[in-house]
Image: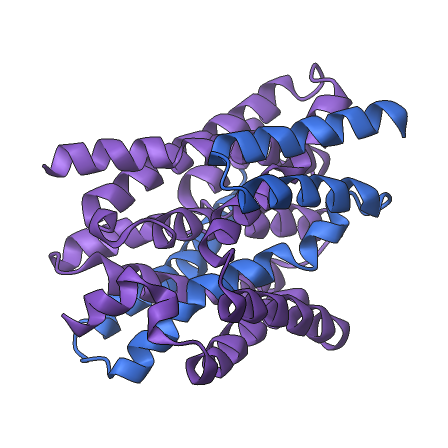
Chain colours: A purple, B blue
Amino acid sequence: MASKQFKNGVIAGLPVLLGYIPVGIAYAILAHQAGFGIWETCSLSVFVFAGASQMMAAGMYAQGAGLAAIIIATFILNLRHIIMSACILNRMGEAPLWKRLAAMFGTTDESFAVFTTEKRENCTLPFFAGVVVTTYLAWNAGTLLGAVLSDFLPEIITASLGIALYALFISLLVPKISGNLRLTALAVLTGLCNLLLCLVMESSWALIVSTLLCAFIGVFFVRDEDLGEEAQTNEA
Amino acid sequence: MRLEIALLVLGMTLVTYIPRALPALLLDKMKLSPRVERFLNLIPYTAMAALIFPGVLSVDAAQPLIGILGGLTALALAWRKCPLILCVLAAIGVDFVLYLFL
């Protein structure tokens, strides 16, 4: 049973490959330009496993930023994962603490998106572990490919793949809200709210504030039946 | 590997893992009220909307059309409930064609 769920998770993570390989390559190219060696570039992907943070770190290092500044910026950028891990754990149900602590190493925007749009009965720890294994391997494969082959890939290919992660988020979100006016309104409201907040604060803060603020507003106008099976699970 | 980079890796590993793991330590001990439960159930919708917009406009900072048309392609197909992988591949394909002409 657990191994079947794990396998389903591995499969559910596959579309992320399309996004992670090119972004991993882009990161490796940036890291190379910042003067990182192959093993330095790869060790960040192995231990940190956070694309946006790694890109930012390479960029800041290239501009001569100090270690403390880079580490503080990374922390701020990753605060959103507190919210995402909380959501994932809330759906996951009972599991030993050490397993949950290990699984949460794999919390990313993408594993969160794949896991929380799954049907409730699939939301188990082995399923999440499967998603994490696929995404982790894809990220590291992309990094290695980029570190080794960056000079040989045609630019039009890597450029065209830039849309992949956004397309993934859109394709996960839209079927969950299409045909439901209140959820669609909530998503549109959040996007606009984030746009406005981006004008007055760092985008990593804007993401956190708009996510929390709009979910809070949503509590007052989204109905339980909008959330379908999720609401029923809660009542049970 | 240079010592400076080893320290960078160590520091970044810690500040990335701590926010990820924190809820596992905290959530265990508290029972969530239905309101909070509902709030958490809405987070995936709002977090994903915020991840998409306005970021999608700057996929290619020099050419917003790349993000807009690629994004609309995924939107249109996903609205019709096409398979995930098809939506993603179609968006990539549209941008590939756009780059041929831009």
Q: Is residue B77 visible?
A: yes
Residue A167: quarter of image? top right
Q: In the figure, A147 relative to A105: above or below?
A: above
Q: Nearer the viewer, residue B11 or B15?
A: B15
Which residue is drawn at the image coordinates 61% and 55% (left, top)?
Answer: B52
For residue A209, side relative to residue A114 (left or right): right
Image coordinates for residue B35, horizontal then vertical, percent: 31, 83
Q: Nearer the viewer, residue A72 or A201?
A: A201
Which residue is drawn at the image coordinates 60% and 25% (left, top)?
Answer: A146
Image coordinates for residue B71, horizontal then vertical, percent: 68, 44
For residue A97, side relative to residue A61 (left or right): left
Which residue is drawn at the image coordinates 68% and 55% (left, top)?
Answer: B55
For residue A50, side relative to residue A96 (left or right): right
Q: In the figure, A58 relative to A204: above or below?
A: above
Residue A203: quarter of image? bottom right
Outermost residue toward the right in this view: B102
For residue B60, side relative to residue A130 (left or right): right
Q: Quadrant of the C terminus of chain A?
A: bottom left
Image coordinates for residue A78, horizontal then vertical, percent: 49, 61
Q: Is residue A75 visible?
A: no
Q: In the figure, A77 relative to B34: above or below?
A: above
Outermost residue toward the top in this view: A152
Which residue is drawn at the image coordinates 21% and 56% (left, top)?
Answer: A100
Q: How many marks?
A: 0
Q: Quadrant of the N terminus of chain A?
A: top left
Q: Nearer the viewer, residue A133 or A116?
A: A116
Image coordinates for residue B41, horizontal then vertical, percent: 36, 68
Q: In the figure, A33 relative to A225: above or below?
A: above
Residue A46: quarter of image? top left
